Image (cartoon, helix red, strand yellow):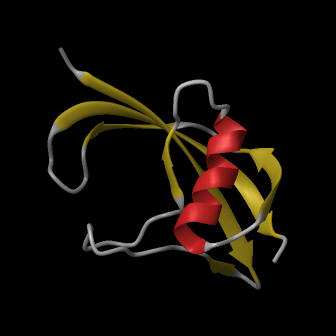
Amino acid sequence: MTKFIVASGAVIIEEGKLLVDKDNKDDFYKLPGGTVEQGETLIGTCIREAKEEINANVEIVRSLNPLIIYKNPRTQEKMIVVLIHYEAKLKN
């Protein structure tokens, strides 16, 4: 059975610059975001993950087109990941 993940994250552009994050787990930069937890909304996940990963309070501006990837970028494991992103702006 193929692993299936739904994730949500924020796309934040300030002064023409895209805000990205790099942690110790990965050797690449990524948007702040993560897996939707049971009972959580997509927007709720986006807001929570921005706070957890980059200590940002964000306001959602609009939803963006979903993306689907078919392997984990870190491990290359085959899976289906549905990425739901929202344009957001910093409140802090």
Give x and y (percent) for residue 65.
63, 39
Quadrant in the rendering for residue 1: top left
Which residue sits at x=52%, y=36%?
36
Give x and y (percent) for residue 75.
15, 51
The C terminus sits in image quarter: bottom right
Side of 66 relative to 71 (left or right) = right
Vertical position of residue 72 compared to residue 22: above or below: above
Side of 45 relative to 89 (left or right) = left
Q: How many marks?
A: 0
Which residue sits at x=21%, y=20%?
2
Vertical position of residue 89 compared to residue 16: above or below: above
Give x and y (percent) for residue 59.
83, 58
**Foreground pick, 72 / 33:** 33
Which residue sits at x=63%, y=31%?
40
Which residue sits at x=65%, y=35%?
42
Side of 43 relative to 71 (left or right) = right
| Residue farthest bottom in this picture | 15
| Residue farthest top in this picture | 1
Side of 92 relative to 56 (left or right) = right
Give x and y (percent) for residue 53.
53, 66
Quadrant in the rendering for residue 80: top left
